[in-house]
Image (tube, rainbow, N blue to C red):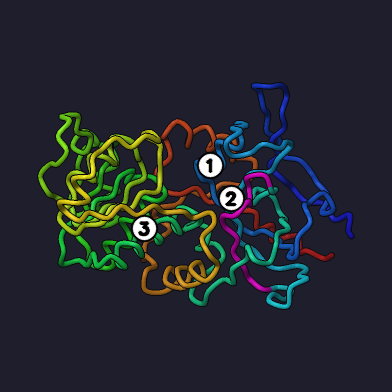
Amino acid sequence: MTKETFKAFLVSQIDNKNYQTNIVEKVVDDLPQGDVLIRVEYSSLNYKDALSAKGNPGVTKKFPHVPGIDAAGRVVISKSAQFQANDSVIVTGFDLGMDTWGGFAEYIRVPAEWVVSLPDGMSLRESMIFGTAGFTAALCIDALQQNNITPDRGEVLVTGATGGVGSIAISILAKLGYAVVAVTGKESQYDYLKFLGASSIISREEVNDNSGKPLLKERWAGVVDTVGGNTLATLIETTKHSGCVTACGLVGGAELITTVYPFILRGVRLIGIDSVQCPIATRSTLWKKLASDWKPSHLERVVTTVNLEELREKVNAILQGKIVGRVLVDLSRKDRLAKL
């Protein structure tokens, strides 16, 4: 089709245990088959991307590989009548950046059913400040609202508060009028969390109960949990009657050891959040909310911007828990227009 070249953050396998990353020049014809060719302007770094960059087989099985589960840019060629050249679009989730070459490159090619039109009121840059993390936060908040968790019901607790999902969840919830309790182990970031809108901040220890009691004092109307494990169990046991807990992460462990008592005696609802296979209709609805009523006024406060060459350092940092907020990957080479 074309020999147009582009830059990509390529992960290669050296042996069974070792992988290396390099910025390389690839050809558009190297991309997988798909309906829509997109010139990527922005991507973002997520924990899953870092795992892929380190060769984690639970994320990526085929190498060499380009990570990046998020991408935003402009359509170059489309076989689908739904999209035209120069349309601004967003792609997150599905297989992008997992076993399909992803957004850490200047071009991607994907099926049309993975693509969402950029909503009015949002720039391509803003869409990737949100990225999968922001979209996941939106899914959590939407689930809380669908389960009648309104601001007058009481406090909403957010774990992993300084991370991407947590930072954006706090920002949106505060804008919508909720009293937000942020959970963090980073005392140095208290001012950051207060700036985002947290009404109070507590330590991780306060939501990590090991007493073995099946029910604890009722505290939260709603929960956005990015941690899982015993933290999630504790939050279920401390949620108020008819409250709602959303679960979207497992950094604290994949096992959930609890009892049925919170569910049958307090009517607590546990909602699993999946941003990967979420239907396009839901995606479009929530992206429109993020572009309007749910968009925080301080998006730039939660983001650090890097280019492809600076990405390796951030991959290591996110795996070490050293990232605060979001990392935006800028691929908008203004001096190079796509002419295919």
Label 2, secondary structure: give it.
Answer: loop
Residues in magenta?
A: 87-99
Where residue 326 sits in the image (x, y, percent)? 45, 49
The residue indicated by pointer 3 is 140
Of the two numbered discs 3 and 1 on the same chain, state the one appearing first in sequence. 1
Q: Amino acid at mark 1?
A: Lys
Q: CA distance from mark 2 to mark 3?
A: 19 Å
Left or right: where 115 falls relative to 258: right
Please give the name of the residue rendered at 74% of the width and 47% of the height, measured from the top-left corner.
7
| Residues packed near mark 3 inside 10 Å, few (<14), some (14 to 19) or many (20 plus) | many
Label 3, secondary structure: give it.
Answer: helix
Nearer the observer, 302 or 295: 295
Q: Is residue 38 above or below residue 327?
A: below
Q: Looking at the rendering, in which quadrant would you find the C terminus?
A: bottom right
The residue indicated by pointer 2 is 69
The residue indicated by pointer 1 is 48
Where residue 116 sits in the image (x, y, percent)? 59, 68
| Residues packed near mark 2 inside 10 Å, few (<14), some (14 to 19) or many (20 plus) | many
Label 1, secondary structure: give it.
Answer: helix
Task: Specify the farthest residue to the left.
Answer: 217
| The magenta stretch spans residue 88 | yes
Q: Is residue 147 above or below residue 31?
A: below
Of the two numbered discs 1 and 2 on the same chain, state the one appearing first in sequence. 1
Q: Check contact, mark 1 vs mark 2: CB within 8 A.
A: yes
Left or right: where 250 falls relative to 269: right
